[in-house]
Image (spheres, rainbow, N blue to C red):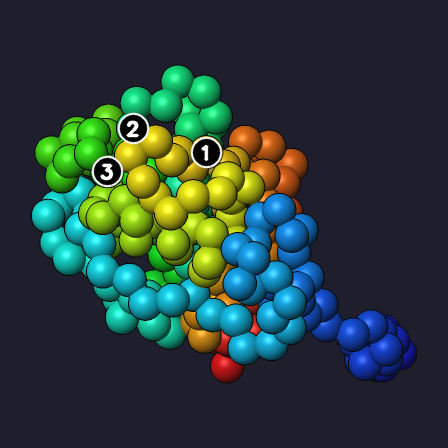
């Protein structure tokens, strides 16, 4: 038994713990990054925001300070990728029920359609739990700015005008310091599995005693 214990200790000492990268704009495909940020190599964080959730409550960046969270962009009437994305977000929600420091955040990209009652209807239909997951609507220009300049999530140009449309399958993993730690295809079950593994790694990094 002593020999086995020594081997385990040696193994743990020799095998380094996996640390997730901290993504900077310069590390991400330029087509996903606003031209003003493409050469930024340090200190990138999610910008401040103030939006409204499915219960009519103002949700701001302060509500996510000190939290790990997964963010995405969707709309309730989407007939294509959003269906799979929401189903996979539900799976993530199920995995984080007992983790108070982990949250979800979904931004509507059609805020003119996704009113608070519409978001609430969608939340009830899908099984969204209010204490874990905010579906948010608000000013379209603010949402577009977040997608392109904070989350580095979309290829489309534009400033959130009436004819701009964000449509991305990306899930983005954010750490308690507001930094991007991973990008994942929210329509792909294997990639969502990788997200869950890396979410566990990040939780250990910040919240393990």
- Count how many numbered circles sit on residues in the image: 3
Q: What kind of element bears circle 1?
A: loop
Label 3 to label 1: alpha-carbon separation: 13 Å
Label 1 to label 2: alpha-carbon separation: 12 Å
Which is more N-terminal, label 2 or label 3? 2
Give the residue displayed 86% in from the left and 78% down from the top.
14
**Residue 165 in view of the camera:** yes
Give the residue displayed 36% in from the left and 23% down from the top.
78
Q: Which mark is residue 167?
A: 1
Q: Nearer the viewer, residue 65 or 16?
A: 65
Left or right, 94 with reference to 181: left
Residue farthest to the top, as pictured: 79
Q: Does 110 appear above or below 173?
A: above
Please say if the residues under marks 1 and 2 sit with CB atoms less than 8 Å apart: no
Query: Which x, y percent locates residue 134?
Result: 27, 49
Q: Which mark is residue 76?
A: 2
The residue labelled by disc 3 is 111
Please say if the residues under marks 3 and 1 sit with CB atoms less than 8 Å apart: no
Query: Which x, y percent locates residue 75?
Result: 33, 32
Circle 3 crowding by C-alpha within 10 Å: few under 14, some 14–19, many from 20 = some
Quarter of the image for residue 2 reads: bottom right
Q: Which mark is residue 199?
A: none
Query: Which x, y percent locates residue 68?
Result: 43, 64
Give the residue displayed 50% in from the left and 81% down from the top.
209
Q: What kind of element bears circle 3?
A: loop
Left or right, 73 with reference to 172: left
Question: Which is more foreground, mark 3 or mark 2?
Answer: 3
């Amino acid at each position: 038994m002593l020999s086995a214990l020594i081997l385990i200790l040696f193994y743990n000492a020799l095998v380094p713990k996996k640390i997730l990268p901290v993504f900077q704009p310069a590390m991400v495909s330029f087509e996903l990054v606003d031209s003003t940020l493409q050469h930024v190599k340090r200190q990138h964080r999610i910008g401040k925001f103030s939006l409204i959730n499915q219960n009519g409550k103002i949700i701001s960046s302060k509500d996510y300070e000190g939290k790990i969270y997964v963010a995405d962009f969707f709309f309730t009437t989407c007939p294509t990728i959003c269906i799979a994305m929401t189903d996979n977000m539900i799976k993530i929600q199920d995995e984080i029920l007992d983790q108070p420091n982990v949250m979800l955040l979904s931004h509507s990209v059609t805020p003119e359609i996704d009113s608070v009652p519409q978001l609430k209807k969608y939340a009830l239909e899908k099984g969204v739990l209010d204490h874990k997951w905010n579906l948010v609507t608000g000013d379209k220009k603010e949402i577009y700015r977040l997608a392109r300049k904070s989350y580095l999530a979309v290829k489309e140009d534009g400033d959130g005008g009436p004819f701009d449309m964000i449509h991305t399958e990306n899930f983005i993993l954010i750490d308690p310091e507001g930094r991007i730690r991973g990008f994942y295809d929210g329509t792909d079950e294997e990639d969502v599995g990788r997200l869950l593994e890396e979410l566990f790694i990040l939780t250990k990094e910040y919240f393990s005693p």
